[in-house]
């Protein structure tokens, strides 16, 4: 890349149609705030400077941007007077920057890196301004891209100022635009607000550049990529598009999705080739699944690693900090949290494993619970390799069970169990001979007497 790059990300809109106390740009798609998506795009494009333009009404967006980019990376636009005015707000933060600048939108999370890169590379082809356009299904209120007979971009006309003939144009403005930063700010200084909305339109820079003898160009995008989110309905549309693309990508990478439309991904889900995912699985953030693992139906995973060949579910809940070892089995209604499960270990039924290390090949019986919390603090349970935890064992942490040790079913284990030992903690069983038979006979007689009371009363 020969020319240095900067991004100006607009995030100053009010987002009133979201009807939310959270800034619109912080609503997530694929589990990641839309603002983060746009910042990631700018970084992926190699932008050495990124400025986020925020409004006075969205301090949460400002805080998020500075958390990701560092202090001094936001610019305040107050009050908002239009898109040109918003971009100008970033001028001071870009003082001295002489490379190319792209204008991006924090409510437009699906633009592909290759598409945005094309907006920059078009500048290197001798164009002073390049604009990302798309063929709109319904051009509606979008700005129209008016091209010259040679295929250059002549002007962008907002729908409110367009002639009936211009309104028939289906090539629309996505809003994304790039130009050399010094020229962009010179042109912006010339933009006026004598238009239908009384706003400073960023789109005017195209005609202003042409008036100076420069050339401009429209760069094509798919309409789905440039979808802007203004309401929860559009947020759901963006989410659905993200999910569809992510599932498609996973399958192309060698993952079997039996019912892809029922599997929910996060932006950072990593599934290796030859992973099989059954229907209705949710991947929360930070999930890594290694090759050969099978995630069975109705499982929910979050911030965990599932190692080679492991079998998860059906109906498993794998919570943050879980590391499920190679070929381990975590079965139905088993919940793990901060659990390091050794290779080949099994917890197949109805179990809670939290703050625990389980050694290789250990078997955890049905109904086992690591009692890790006393209402104030969390405590660790350590279980060695090749151990056998009997069904319905309560492991009251902190506690350890040594290698090869066993616990008897129903035991409440409060003391460490040495390697190779059996720990049993339950009262002696008594058998009362004939008691059940006599009990039944007594009850049956009482019931019969009630059903046929003596007559004459
Ligand atoms: C804008 C474009 C239009 C394009 C459409 C694509 C202009 C004049 N028009 O129109 O050609 O087809 O987007 O969606 O640019 N914003 C600020 N500060 C402001 C005004 C806007 O940060 O003062 C931000 C908004 O939060 C929003 C974006 O800029 O994310 C676009 O603003 P909006 O008012 O929605 O512009 P449109 O009228 O839709
Ligand atoms: Mg808009």
Image (cartoon, grey):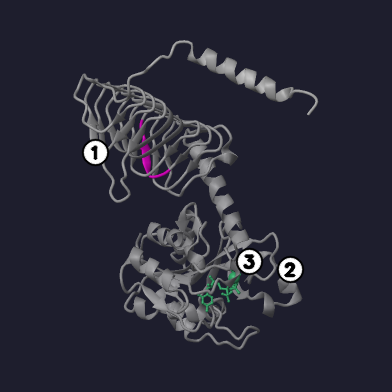
* Residue 436 numbered mark, or none: none
Label 3 neighbour load within 10 Å: few <14, some 14-19, many 20+? many
Q: Nearer the viewer, residue 114 or 448?
A: 448
* Residue wearing tag 3: 172
* Earlier sequence position, callout 1 versus callout 2: 2
The residue under the point 37% across, 44% down is: 320
The residue under the point 34% across, 65% down is: 67
State the extent of the magenta-drawn residues as a range: 302-307
* Residue wearing tag 2: 168
Q: Nearer the viewer, residue 257 or 190?
A: 257
In the image, taking residue 185 as reference, residue 160 lies left or right, namely: right
The residue under the point 43% across, 65% down is: 124
* Residue wearing tag 1: 398
Between the residue at mark 3 and the residue at mark 1, the CA separation in whole angstroms equals: 64 Å
Whether 289 is drawn above or below 389: the answer is below
Disc 2, ligand 1: is the CB inside 8 Å?
A: no
Residue 303 located within the stretch drawn in magenta: yes
């Amino acid at each position: 890349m020969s020319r240095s790059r900067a991004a100006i990300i607009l995030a100053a809109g009010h987002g009133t149609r979201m009807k939310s106390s959270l800034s619109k740009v912080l609503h997530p798609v694929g589990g990641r705030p839309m603002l983060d998506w746009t910042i990631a795009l700018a970084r992926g494009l190699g932008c050495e400077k990124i400025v986020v333009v925020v409004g006075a009404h969205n301090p949460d967006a400002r805080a998020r941007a500075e958390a990701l980019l560092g202090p001094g990376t936001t610019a305040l636009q107050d009050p908002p007077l239009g898109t040109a005015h918003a971009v100008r707000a970033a001028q001071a933060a870009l003082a001295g920057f002489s490379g190319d600048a792209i204008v991006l939108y924090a409510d437009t999370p699906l633009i592909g890196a290759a598409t945005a890169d094309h907006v920059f590379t078009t500048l290197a082809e001798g164009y002073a301004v390049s604009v990302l356009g798309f063929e709109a299904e319904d051009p509606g209120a979008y700005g129209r891209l008016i091209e010259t007979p040679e295929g250059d971009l002549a002007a962008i006309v907002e729908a409110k100022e367009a002639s009936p003939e211009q309104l028939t144009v289906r090539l629309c403005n996505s809003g994304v635009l790039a130009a050399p930063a010094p020229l962009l700010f010179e042109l912006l200084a010339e933009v006026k607000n004598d238009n239908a909305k009384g706003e400073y339109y960023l789109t005017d820079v195209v005609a202003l550049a042409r008036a100076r003898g420069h050339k401009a160009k429209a760069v094509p995008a798919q309409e789905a990529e440039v979808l802007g989110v203004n309401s929860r309905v559009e947020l759901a549309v963006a989410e659905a598009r993200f999910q569809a693309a992510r599932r498609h990508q996973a399958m192309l990478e060698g993952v079997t999705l039996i019912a892809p439309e029922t599997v929910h991904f996060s932006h950072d889900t990593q599934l290796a080739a030859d992973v099989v995912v059954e229907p209705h699985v949710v991947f929360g953030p930070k999930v890594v699944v290694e090759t050969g693992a099978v995630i069975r139906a109705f499982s929910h995973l979050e911030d965990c690693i599932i190692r080679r060949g492991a079998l998860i579910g059906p109906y498993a809940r794998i919570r943050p900090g879980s590391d499920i070892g190679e070929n381990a089995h975590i079965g139905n209604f088993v919940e793990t949290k901060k659990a390091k499960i050794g290779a080949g270990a099994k917890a197949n039924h109805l179990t809670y494993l939290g703050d625990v290390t389980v050694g290789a090949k250990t078997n955890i019986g049905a109904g086992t619970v690591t009692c890790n919390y006393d209402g104030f603090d969390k405590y660790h349970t350590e279980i060695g390799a090749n151990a056998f935890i009997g069904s319905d064992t309560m492991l009251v942490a902190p506690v350890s069970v040594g290698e090869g040790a066993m616990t008897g079913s129903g035991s409440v284990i409060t003391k460490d169990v040495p390697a190779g030992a059996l720990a049993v903690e339950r009262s002696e069983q008594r058998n009362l001979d004939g008691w059940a038979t006599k009990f039944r006979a007594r009850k049956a007689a009482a019931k019969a007497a009630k059903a046929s009371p003596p007559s004459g009363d």
